Amino acid sequence: MPIYDIDTIDRVILNILQKDGRIANVDLAERAGLSPSPCARRVKNLEDSGIIARYAALIDQKAVGLPVNVFVNVTLERQVKDALQNFEAAILKRPEVMECYLMTGEADYFLRVVVADLDAYERFLVEHLTRIPGIANIKSSFALKQIAYRTELPIR
């Protein structure tokens, strides 16, 4: 991936695109204070450098029948390379797992799992998560209410 230093105009473009990834280049250029060609070149450079990783639609999870967020702490029996790789490979196969982080502290992994209801989480837990070899402990916490959810990075 090429190294690309972002400047103030790139930051403006990134902030606009984070709010509206489908904005027309002409409108983006106008809001960024550029003409369309240089604006398109900058966006292309941001994409090619990997700063813009991809474009996506943000879906309301309740509207598609997946209102439950479960935060799961997983502790492995041993933190050895093979155990870590096996766990990560298994987790990457599960579409319910929206996020997974290797952690410091008490738990080895922190997961955000999205499901339709408690029965669906129980099925995920019993049929998938507990079957991954090397897990010592699983602690689940259910989100009662979402207070903040952001997809925009605070680019200044």
Image (cartoon, rainbow, N blue to C red):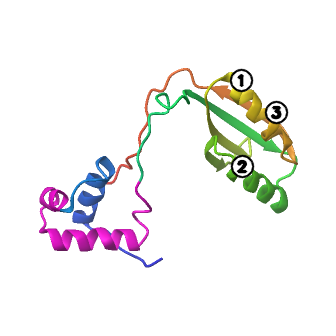
Q: Left of 141 or right of it: where is 147?
A: left
User: Residue at coordinates 39% horizontally, 50% vertically from top-left?
Assistant: 153
The residue type indicated by label 3 comes to Val
Q: Which mark is residue 91?
A: 2
As drawn, 129 above or below 46: above
The residue type indicated by label 2 comes to Ile
Question: Residue 119, located in which quarter of the rendered image?
Answer: top right
Q: Is residue 97 magenta?
A: no
User: Residue at coordinates 44% horizontally, 39% vertically from top-left?
Assistant: 59
Question: Residue 135, located in which quarter of the rendered image?
Answer: top right
Q: Residues within 10 Å of mark 2 (few under 14, many from 20)?
A: some
Which residue, given by chain and number where applicable, does mark 1 sit on?
Answer: 119
Which residue, given by chain and number where applicable, does mark 3 sit on?
Answer: 126
The boundaries of the magenta stretch are 26-55
Residue at disc 2, secondary structure: helix
Q: Give the percent coordinates (x, y) of residue 7.
A: 27, 68
